[in-house]
Amino acid sequence: MAGHFEVIDAPDGGFRVRMLDPDGALMAESVTFPSIRAAKDGIELAREIAGTGRVIDRSSAAEQSDS
């Protein structure tokens, strides 16, 4: 089974999106969206980025492997 997205109420109003892995562990949580529609649009954008976006490693481990 694939992971999934959840739309949840944000504590300060609005909505947030959680991305969970197949075991239900939290992978990411979004910014606060003002509406459910905006949250669902955010999910569509996340899907597009995940499928086509480049990976840019800016971690300290990347810097060590360059030397």
Image (tube, rainbow, N blue to C red):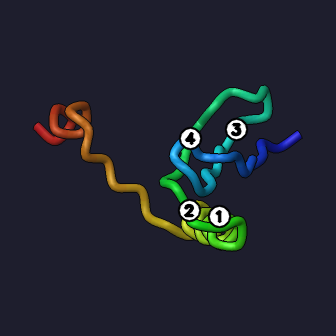
Q: Quadrant of the C terminus?
A: top left
Query: What residue does disc 4 label?
Result: 11
**Of marks 2 and 3, the one in the foreground:** 2
Quick check: can you spot residue 1? yes
Provide residue 26's location: percent of width, then percent of height. Answer: 63, 32
- Image coordinates for residue 43, horizontal then vertical, percent: 66, 63
- Give the residue drawn at x 71%, y 36%: 21
**Camera-nearest label, 3 or 4:** 4
Element at badge 2?
Answer: loop
- Gap between marks 1 and 3, in whole Å? 15 Å
Quadrant in which the N terminus appears: top right
- Between the residue at mark 2 and the residue at mark 1, the CA separation in whole angstroms equals 6 Å
Q: Are marks 2 and 1 in contact (CB under 8 Å)?
A: yes
Residue sticking out furthest to the front: 13
Q: Which residue is mark 2?
A: 33
Q: Which residue is mark 1?
A: 39
Kindly identify the amino acid type of the residue bearing the numbered disc 4.
Pro
